[in-house]
Image (tube, rainbow, N blue to C red):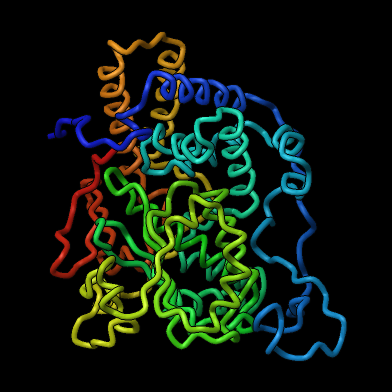
Amino acid sequence: MVSAISLEGRLPGHAGNLTVEQTAALKRFWLRLFELFAQPGDKINLPPPINEPKVAEPKNGGSGFFGWGGKKKTEEKSEEKQYFLGRTADPRWMTLPLQEAIALIPGDKLEQTFWQMVATDNPDAAILRYLRARKWDDEAAYRMLINTLRWRLHMRVDDITKLGETGLYNELEKAKTGFGDQFLEQIRSGKATLGGPDKSDRGICFINVQLHHKEDQPAEAIQICALYLMETARVFLGYPMVNACIVFNLENFTLANWDFEFVKFLIVCLERYYPETLGLCLIHKAPWVFSTVWNVVSPMLDPVVAAKIKFSKNLDEFQQHIDVGSTPVIISKNPDVKTKDEATKADPPKAGVLGTPTSPEYLAYIEETKQYKKETTEWAKQELTEETLAADALKRLERGRTHRIIRIKTEKDIRANTTYHEKGLIKLTPEARLYIDFGGDNWECQDVTERV
């Protein structure tokens, strides 16, 4: 039985708590998107296939701080090639100015990747992230979202979620022998793991910087790993869990662990392509040498993101934000208290496949997106007043919940299982109920199927 939806406790600017003006901005945004999805676009101009067996070297000749501390540059290095990212997109989509590039992309491709970006989220909530990030400037928010869509097509984000880690391994090995192993090493090394909750009941991504050395893997492998983890972490989101926590564990950090290109990639992702998804960034045990790094990073940060960054010098300060039961052993130093991820063994997940599903659940989902567009178009053209605002908000939440439930029913067709599914942090039952279970004494397994 579907539970009742309440407007109580809804955050301002979020679905269920919008002003008349904010609702009007949301309506204009939807109508403009639907116009975009109808455009013909241009013929795709794919890059030539890569047949080169050589391993490319980074330009800067090594790891360390802007290349310092790495291997000495003895010869001119060629630009590092990409073997997976960008291989199914027209290169003009990312090289041309935004408006010129978007005009080239077929509307149906933009629409497909948009719904994959929404995933199990409330579609209104997905768009509102962009409007809040651009302070309700319609035009700026629209540019931000369409820039995200072209980027997701270029970065093959939908393929990453379809394939999962095992499917990615197979595809990367096809592209270049040994590349799949390099990707899996990022996943299994412990340098980045998911868990939770923090004290605001958010999911957490732990990044253990001491385990990372730039020259140990190509930049593409670590970027694919980051995208895979960010898209997996998005499964945890659903009101009231509207954003996530990132922990940078800097214990034993040296400049040999510093990777400026990856840090820049991560900042750009959070600010441009995953807006309003960061709730807290906790930097733990930063040594004095990190001040040099911080002087480089801090000017790059958007003030909104910078305001979410906190520091902890020891475990007591750390536990002001995250209980020890949610903390990996590498941080807590207590092998008797492990996270669910650490304490659970699981077989590798089954590989996902590319291509369009044909299951009844997927076909029902496609029909649902068409119906959602139809109803949203009609809604967007209706007048709204202060007197009808609450009823309108409730109706839109109910519509969003219907969409989420139907989307969850086809999760098995669209998203490959991950290690976190196999370990039970994410549970999708045969009845298409979605559960989040971080484990530990401070969390009870939660059915999040109907959260909007």
Give the percent coordinates (x, y) of residue 39.
Answer: 66, 26
Q: Is residue 148 left or right of residue 167?
A: right
Which residue is at a point 25% across and 65% down the rendered structure image?
A: 424
Give the quarter of the image for residue 16.
Answer: top left
Which residue is at a point 38% across and 54% down the rendered structure image?
A: 279
Camera-side residue of 188 and 333: 333
- The quadrant the N terminus occupies is top left
Q: Is residue 388 left or right of residue 442?
A: right
Give the percent coordinates (x, y) of residue 107.
Answer: 63, 31
Camera-side residue of 137 and 406: 137
Q: Is residue 236 above or below residue 226?
A: above
Give the quarter of the image for residue 370.
Answer: top left
Give the percent coordinates (x, y) of residue 57.
Answer: 75, 79
Q: Is residue 311 above or below residue 302?
A: below
Which residue is at a point 68% across and 56% down the rendered structure image?
A: 86
Q: Can the viewer see residue 433 in this picture?
A: yes
Q: Can the viewer see residue 53 in this picture?
A: no
Give the percent coordinates (x, y) of residue 31.
Answer: 53, 20
Residue closest to the far right: 76
Q: Is residue 170 left or right of residue 412?
A: right
Count of residue discs:
0
